[in-house]
Image (spheres, rainbow, N blue to C red):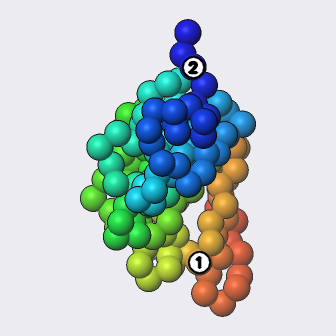
């Protein structure tokens, strides 16, 4: 039986802890005295070997971490979805679509390895479980797209 990670258990192990957070999905996060975040799932540290300045765990098992350069990395099933990207933010939808924000402030919607927002300067994007999605242009207008794009 795996023991639950608590601030006290980390202190007992000789680890200085700034805080411990428990996600509703059962994952836990703790920040060490150097400011690095550690994400634990089922007793295993997902961030092992990473210098994570921040982490987030989604209820559908995807998770993200922020590196020391301010780039975000989105993880799914042991793979990095954002590999090769300089993502300034990310978001994962429970139905599988995901977003990343580029340095120019445009969001990119990804579905099944394809960028749906290619050629669009999207200032915001929403994706729906029925595969429809909408995006906000720089003039503040929303555009609804069907899931076939």
* Image position of 94 with respect to 110: above or below: above
Q: Are marks 2 and 1 in contact (CB under 8 Å)?
A: no
| Residue 42: image location, x then y, percent | 53, 24
**What whole-number distance in Å separates the C-alpha atoms at marks 2 and 1?**
44 Å
In the rendered image, is residue 111 in sight? no
Looking at the image, which is closer to me, 75 or 144? 75
Looking at the image, which is closer to me, 109 or 105? 105
Q: Is residue 103 left or right of residue 9?
A: left
* Image position of 66 with respect to 47: above or below: below
Q: Quadrant of the N terminus?
A: top right
Res 3 → quadrant: top right
* Residue drawn at 39 percent across, 42 percent down: 47
Res 95 → quadrant: top right
Which label number is shown at residue 123? 1
> Crowdedness of circle 1 by 10 Å Cα count: few (<14), some, many (20+)?
some
Looking at the image, which is closer to me, 13 or 128? 13
Q: How many marks?
A: 2
Q: Quadrant of the C terminus?
A: bottom right
In the rendered image, is residue 126 in sight? yes
The disc, 2 or 1, on the residue closer to the chain's N-terminal end is 2
Give the farthest residue toward the top.
Answer: 1
* Residue drawn at 36 percent across, 45 percent down: 80
Q: Secondary structure at mark 2?
A: loop
* Residue drawn at 56 percent across, 43 percent down: 29
Which residue is identified by label 2? 3
| Residue 20: image location, x then y, percent | 61, 45
| Residue 8: image location, x then y, percent | 60, 36
Looking at the image, which is closer to me, 118 or 74? 74
| Residue 51: image location, x then y, percent | 34, 54
Q: Nearer the viewer, mark 2 or mark 1?
A: 2
């Amino acid at each position: 039986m795996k023991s639950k990670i608590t601030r006290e258990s980390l202190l007992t192990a000789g680890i200085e802890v700034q805080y411990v957070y428990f996600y509703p999905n059962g994952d836990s996060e703790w920040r060490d005295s150097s400011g690095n975040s550690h994400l634990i799932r089922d007793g295993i540290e997902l961030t092992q070997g990473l210098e994570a300045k921040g982490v987030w765990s989604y209820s559908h098992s995807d998770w993200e971490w922020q590196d020391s350069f301010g780039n975000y990395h989105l993880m799914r099933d042991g793979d990095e979805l954002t590999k090769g990207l300089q993502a300034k933010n990310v978001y994962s939808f429970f139905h599988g679509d995901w977003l990343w924000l580029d340095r120019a402030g445009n969001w990119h919607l990804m579905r099944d390895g394809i960028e749906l927002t290619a050629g669009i300067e999207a200032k915001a994007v929403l994706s729906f479980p029925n595969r429809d999605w909408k995006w906000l242009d720089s003039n503040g207008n929303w555009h609804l797209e069907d899931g076939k794009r």
